[in-house]
Image: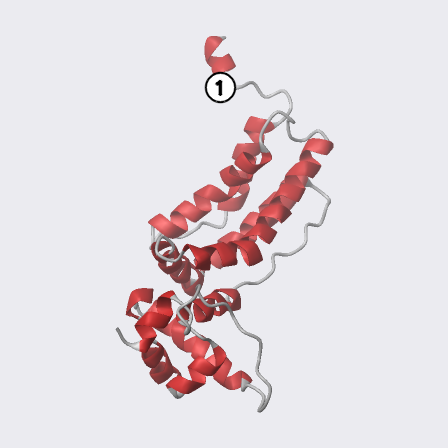
């Protein structure tokens, strides 16, 4: 196995999967080289190259830099892929706090807009296909990116419970999944399916209709 393949699973010393290391002393890193390398990975994934097919040599060629330049920045592809994912992340806008419904629609619209981006959806599908073999990569991304977005959604739902817009007898993590799940399913399972502009509002209204105070559970409705 060549160096690129081996570094894909573990750090250069054979230990745990590599994390991004701090910059070393000496000549400052070139921001242009960093950007070119990350851009090269994104371009290759867009062209249908799987993570398994990526090598540090191939990435270096695509970026127009030497392989040593890549390894000086990232000890292995796990560390590089984590920075690639982070490069696509844009913090979601803060909730306006005027309406729980409008804040939920705004959060889902942000996800819809990102889901329409070819790079975002392509990377998501590629990473999910790889996560079984590299759970540490997904765990790190979840801890640094996904958790913050989930907490933002939970914050809006908690406010909805506090002001009486949402019933208090539902698990909020489950409710959060009901809002986000359909959009993720389309992005992951239906590659060429667009996310319509009306989808965020439709999802929010559909879920809120079922969890508003006074709404009857389905079982009770059927029994009546």
Give the residue at x 43% y 51%: 195
Q: Position of residue 221 (x, y in %)?
A: 50, 14
Kind of element beneath mark 1? helix
Q: Relative to 153, is 33 above or below?
A: below
Residue 137: percent from the left, percent from the top? 45, 59
Query: In this view of the protein, which residue sits in the foreground, 150 or 99?
Result: 150
Residue occupying image coordinates x 57% and y 91%: 27
Of residue 217 and residue 79, the one placed in the foreground of this image is 79
The residue most toward the left is: 1
* Quadrant in the rendering for residue 81: bottom left
Name the residue located 60 percent from the left edge and 86 percent from the top edge: 25
Q: 64 left or right of 86?
A: left
Q: Residues within 10 Å of mark 1 (few under 14, many from 20)?
A: few
Q: Is residue 99 visible?
A: yes
Residue 38 placement: quadrant: bottom left
- On the question of residue 102 being in view, the answer is no
> x%, y% of residue 223?
47, 9
Residue drawn at the location 35% of the way across and 57% of the way down: 130
């Amino acid at each position: 196995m060549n160096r690129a393949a081996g570094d894909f699973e573990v750090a250069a010393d054979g230990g745990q999967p590599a994390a991004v290391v701090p910059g070393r002393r000496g000549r400052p890193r070139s921001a242009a080289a960093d950007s070119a390398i990350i851009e090269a990975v994104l371009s290759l994934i867009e062209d249908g190259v799987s993570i398994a097919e990526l090598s540090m040599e191939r990435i270096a060629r695509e970026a127009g830099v030497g392989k040593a330049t890549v390894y000086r920045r990232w000890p292995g592809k796990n560390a590089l892929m984590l920075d690639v994912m982070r490069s696509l992340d844009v913090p979601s806008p803060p909730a306006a706090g005027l309406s729980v419904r409008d804040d939920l629609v705004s959060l889902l619209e942000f996800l819809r807009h990102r889901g329409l981006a070819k790079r975002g959806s392509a990377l998501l599908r590629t990473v999910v296909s790889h996560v079984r073999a590299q759970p540490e990569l997904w765990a790190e991304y979840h801890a640094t990116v996904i958790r913050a977005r989930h907490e933002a959604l939970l914050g809006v739902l908690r406010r909805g419970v506090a002001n009486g817009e949402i019933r208090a007898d539902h698990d909020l993590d489950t409710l959060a999944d009901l809002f986000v799940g359909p959009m993720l399913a389309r992005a992951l399972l239906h590659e060429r399916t667009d996310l319509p502009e009306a989808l965020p509002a439709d999802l929010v209204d559909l879920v809120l209709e079922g969890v508003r105070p006074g709404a009857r559970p389905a079982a009770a409705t059927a029994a009546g």
